[in-house]
Image (cartoon, rainbow, N blue to C red):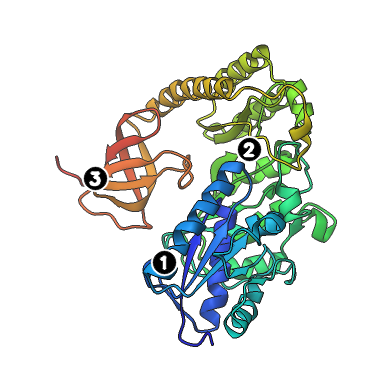
Amino acid sequence: MLSGKKFGVISLGCDKNRVDTEKMLGLLRTRGYTLTDDISAAQILIVNTCAFLESARQEAIETVLECAEQKTDGKLEKLVVTGCLPQKFIGELFAPLQEVDVFLGINDYEKIFEALEESYKKDERQNYVGKGRDGYIRDRVLTTADHFAYLKIADGCYNHCTYCLIPKIRGKYRSYPMEELLREAQDLGETAELILVAQDTTRYGEDLYGENRFVELLQRLSALENIKKIRLLYCYPDVIGDELIEEIATNDKILKYIDIPLQHSEDRVLKLMNRKGNREGYLALIKKLRARIPEIAIRSTFISSFPSETEAEFTGMLAFIRQARLLNCGFFAYSREPDTGAYRMKGQVHHATKKRRVRALYETQRAISKELLSTFIGKKITVLCDGIDYEKGCFVGRGYFSAPDIDGKVYFHAAEATQGEYYEVEIDSADAYDLYGRTEDYEL
């Protein structure tokens, strides 16, 4: 019944979810099905969802309802919803979301063919959440540009932060086998930048091998000739030890960049969040990283207005931001999520206060980022070309200090540049987010 059907996929949420989508596409390709980027041409449309925050759940449902309109206006025959949203909330979704023909959870992607066959055969909606198995899938179809890719090295989490739904959705931390990850990375072909992701990359191997093997994984990935550079995301501060710092410092393939989700700076709030760090330890870690790797770019994320956060604690976080002087930061207002420890906490902060505090954090960081980026003016930096920005009329890329989508860019003029290649760019100017420059061969 599925023979000759054309599949389309929409992926929502984080880069970890993107990898799940790419592996689902890999399953479809392996079975020989036709994939289309034109959603209006799809006969079977899959929406892979995020459910981390209320805003993400709203986006997912709105997207599903918009897609469902194609059942009357277009070629769409079946609508499939997969991922985090049905995994956690299938009990609340199945009855009211009649527009959806098939539901699959985070471990059910291999069941998509069986579920769709049943849906066509019986002309009935199918709930396959929880019918699959928790297993590693290697084949994938990249949805990023050809020159960079994400490598998801583990799933789940056992940190149990009180604001976070991930353990309730994704389960406990599960490292993927190293040999499989190495084969997956090799299968990617020539890759200018490999970006390692997981809910917590730095705990890699502890569950699977009984010891931390993150540094070993970095060393073995670095030995692959097809991988040019490696970027590290989501490195939890309490697991960043001397061995990892030394590997970043001495391994030429590892970009001098690290994403460390600190989430707050004040000790009382960190304890309420069930975070293992404290202000003094965070500042000591930043100091140690900079002492060993002077050029390192540190990125972080912070949650403002956690329940009972006082004005003094908010001011303390502002002071921490000024003292830490990180190049890139993301700030989020606390989102009250059901089935988390923080949901029941007293002292929920008013939404207007949340908005004011996040705005102040971004304004503070904007000034810091602008000052730090201005230090590149007059210098030459290595830039990975991501393509052409037609609105600005120039090439666009990233330095070692910028990850895709979340950090700033380098806009540059050149006589010629190829996507996926590295170029030496002299920086002429900077703003709070981006750099602007030109290659040596460019004539004004």
Residue identifier under label 3: 391
Q: Is the C terminus in the top left, top right, bottom left or bottom right quadrant?
A: top left
Q: Residue at x 61, y 75 (%)?
A: 112
Q: Is the N terminus in the top left, top right, bottom left or bottom right quadrant?
A: bottom right
Q: Which mark is residue 351?
A: none
Q: Nearer the viewer, residue 221 or 48?
A: 48
List the single residue furthest toward the right.
Answer: 210
Image: 184 above or below 407: below
Q: Earlier in the sequence, mark 3 or mark 1?
A: 1
Q: Nearer the viewer, residue 411 or 417?
A: 411
Task: Find numbered disc 3 in the image and state the secondary structure of the residue it sits on.
Answer: loop
Q: Residue at x 38, y 58 (%)?
A: 420
Whether pointer 2 and pointer 1 mark residues with C-beta atoms closer than 8 Å, the reply is no
Residue identifier under label 1: 70
Q: Residue at x 61, y 79 (%)?
A: 113
* Quadrant in the rendering for residue 351: top right
